[in-house]
Amino acid sequence: MKTAAAKKPKKAARGKPARRIEAQTRTKFVYSFDEIRLAERAAGSWDGVRGLLGGKGANLGEMTKLKMPVPPGFVVTTEACKAFLAAGDRFPRGMWEQALSAVAALERATRKKFGDPDNPLLVSCRSGAKFSMPGMMDTVLNIGLNDAVAEALVRLTGDERFVFDAYRRLIQMYATVVLDVPAKPFEALLEQHRSRRGVWNDADLPAEDLRAITEGFKQIVMERAHRPFPMDAVEQLRLATMAVFRSWNGKRAYDYRKAAGISHDLGTAVNVVAMVFGNLGADSGTGVATTRNVTTGENALEGDFLMNAQGEDVVAGTRKTLPIAELARLMPGVDKELKRIARTLEKHYREVQDIEFTVERGKLWMLQTRDAKRTAQAAIRLAVDLAKEKLISREEAVLRVKPEHVDYFLHPQLDPAARNAASDKGALIASGLNVSPGAAIGQIVFDADTAEHWAQRLEKKVILVRAETRPDDVHGMLAAQGVVTSRGGRTSHAALVARQFGIPTVVGVVALEIDADRRQMRTGSGKVLKEGDWLTIDGGTGEVFAGEIATVVPDVTDPYLVELLSWADRFRRLGIWTNADYPRDAERARKFGAEGIGLCRTEHMFFEAERLPVVRSMILARSAEERAGELAKLLPMQRADFLGLFRAMDGLPVTIRLIDPPLHEFLPNHDELQRTITELETRLKLNDGDAAALEAELAAKRKVLDSVDALREQNPMLGLRGVRLGIHMPELVRMQMRAIIEAACACAKKGVKLKPKIMIPLAATSNELKVQRALLEDEAQKVIREQGVKVPYQFGTMIEVPRAALIADHIAEYAEFFSFGTNDLTQTTFGISRDDAETGFLSEYLQKGILERNPFATIDQAGVGKLMEIGVKLGRQRRKGLEIGICGEHGGDPASIAFCHRTGLDYVSCSPFRVPVARLAAAHAALEEKKARR
Ligand code: PEP
Ligand code: MG
């Protein structure tokens, strides 16, 4: 028995891998571009194909299917990558054999041979994940070149310059990607040759230099990697494929995925493509373009290209590029074909594309297409235009614009007056390309690590200034307020990343001479700015200013945004209200599309400078008469506040919340008072000043301290506040009620239509509401009788403590509407302080993954959300059609808005600047629900 039992698992252990190996051998790991249909069958959907072949591979296959000029090639799947990484960097069984047969097929298609000096095939080996991660993973070009092939190619093409340019690029890329040799020594050798020849571009180096550079590069490899550059083409391809797979787990790819919310489990595919050359002379070139302008959304091909160059020269931003419009002049035939292809691609994908192409001796080759990244401004215009052109529906247009796009749209801009004043004083130090809009102000830093350190550890605002950014600068870009580069074009790495993340950015500021080693930069006029100096940039105009300039937030008047939001309004069910305390906020919110005020925090009015002394005297009053006197002073002020709000919202609902915070918030700070008293006592002892005056001041301060002491609570947020305060100090809320109804009567007399909604905060029992409402009703009726005008009004409550949600049916007996105060509800449900947690342990919780999201930013659906669901259900059980909204900060958060939609709330109320975002998010919630039901 024992032996048999011991044997059994052994047998199973042998059997399992055997089955796995068998399965792997059968798995198709390699697809040629013309096998896209097979991939579709295997993956089941276009999304599946992209998952399997990566976006680049899937699109190359798709372009091949569309009969576009794509060089022959094949894709090694993401499945292979995942298996490779899981097995500790070993190809899955059968994969390499499949790759070699695909190489053989490539050889047949091109009638060339891999590694054959007489007729060599050269290939590129590029990464390509499901979601585009520009420049984050590795690429090796010109694989297949070696000493013999190079010499043979020179004989074959008669173009020694081209051959050695390609060869030195292969060694350079191979060394940095496969062998991890740093880029610096290669760049240094190139720079040596450029400066010796007095040229700016590598393309201007003669063949003889490139030959010498190739030799030099081989030596660098030997010195740094302690092994020679491999001459065997198949070995080059094998190691390059491994390196690309490994680059999925590289730091920059990891950081990028984290920031972009891309799963770490997807893996990358490898695209092996027959090389075409853009550096074969004056009739060759290479470029990148978007089918429309992705900065403004304008309908015109936009991009850069270089004559006689290879792909990475354009993207790296290391050479001065030509605008794509020049192509029409330089290569009219190619230009025409490119435009035709661009249109076809847009129609096919129903989306603006970002394309890469190469022209080899006059023939156009398409190397890539993908959905183009865009600025927020462009995203909105493109969605509207594509819908109008009937490429997509209005629903799709609305879904394509993200709430963040609308938000970025509201990014601060430079205050025009402050900008002009700064410019007059000579602060405008340079300008460049306006690749990602918005104004940004920060202290200059010259490298990504410093940017991250200053921003995250020292909580400084920084602007990252670099000659050009590279993929491993991404963490610094994400930490910065804005980015400036002295080189690079619209499609440079810096521009692509900035646009995606909405980081205000100016690139190609050639007038800036950046010396990162000495931590300084020199402007065209000789001004030197050092690390830590302040800089202001305008990503919308491309201007760079020394110093800080005031910013303003623009009105939402962009016609495309207005139109898109009007479509969104037709799709949403949720009402969008606003939290506004002052008429000016209410007016702005209304302009942004608010349909009511969901929360007016009346106590904010009490904090105004001329009112605070009156409020204090009212609180500190020693007798009922004294208090009544102070309240009488406050009454006209409150009445004027409400009049302003009613007028601004004419006809729309206005929800006024009665006083909520604990009274100590209006009083001087206890510790400060104590310090002043000690100081006064010391001065008195030392005869420092007029004794009588000091005595009088001391007595007054002691009186205040007594009152502060009397009102002092250990836990004020759980103390005398909200409805409890209204019950404890009825004359205060009576005054507020009087002010509301008097203002309402005055408006009604002038024909302003309104129905004030009086909201009682922090109730936990139905009796609190019963008592408070009776008192307020009494005051309201008194005013109505006095004024002789009938105005309708409603009483409601905020649901801010779990008990209120749990007994919402009882609460609804006395409340005609509910509004979830999710700031307090989150605080009281979690039992964590909303004032302290976010700067304390909460960030640790988020970092450690104990909490997935900050519950004060996005509703915690499992806990707080559950209470809301209970509240909605019970409330409406008791009172049919009970109107329910939310007025906590979550009311402006897209994920929380979607939850409110699903939970059946009537409206969300958020700050005025979130109103446009909320309108879109509410439409998304409704459309997503509709999609899910289909
Ligand atoms: C809330 O608690 O969610 C709320 C809106 O009230 P306040 O933030 O004023 O406490
Ligand atoms: Mg509250």
Image (tube, rainbow, N blue to C red):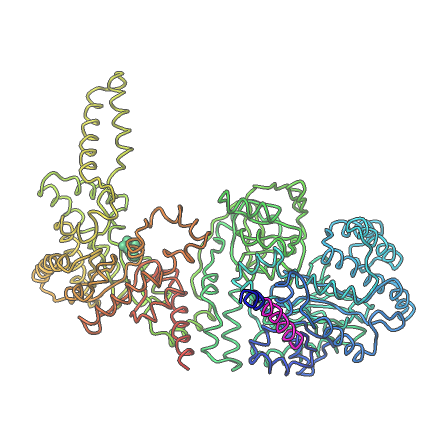
> Can residue 4 be seen at all in this image of the molecule?
yes
Secondary structure, magenta segment, majority class: helix
Q: Is residue 9 left or right of residue 632?
A: right
User: Quick check: which quadrant has ligand 1?
Assistant: bottom left
Q: Nearer the viewer, residue 307 or 881?
A: 881
Q: Nearer the viewer, residue 931 or 426?
A: 931
Q: Nearer the viewer, residue 550 or 339?
A: 339
- Which quarter shows the C terminus? bottom left
Identify the residue at the far front of this view.
1
Magenta-highlighted residues: 10-27
Q: Is residue 213 left or right of residue 443?
A: right
What percent of the width, then of the height, locates residue 728?
A: 13, 48
What percent of the width, then of the height, locates residue 538?
A: 55, 55
Query: Quick check: is 25 in the magenta stretch?
Result: yes
Q: Quadrant of residue 788?
A: bottom left
- The mark total stands at 0
Q: Quadrant of residue 371?
A: bottom right
What percent of the width, then of the height, locates residue 390?
A: 51, 82
Query: Quick check: is 768 in the magenta stretch?
Result: no
- Relative vertical location of residue 780 with respect to residue 511 in this rendering, above or below: below
> Can residue 424 be seen at all in this image of the molecule?
no
At 72% from the left edge and 67% from the top edge, which residue is drawn?
A: 125
What percent of the width, then of the height, locates residue 823?
A: 31, 56
- Relative vertical location of residue 97 with respect to residue 426 in this rendering, above or below: below
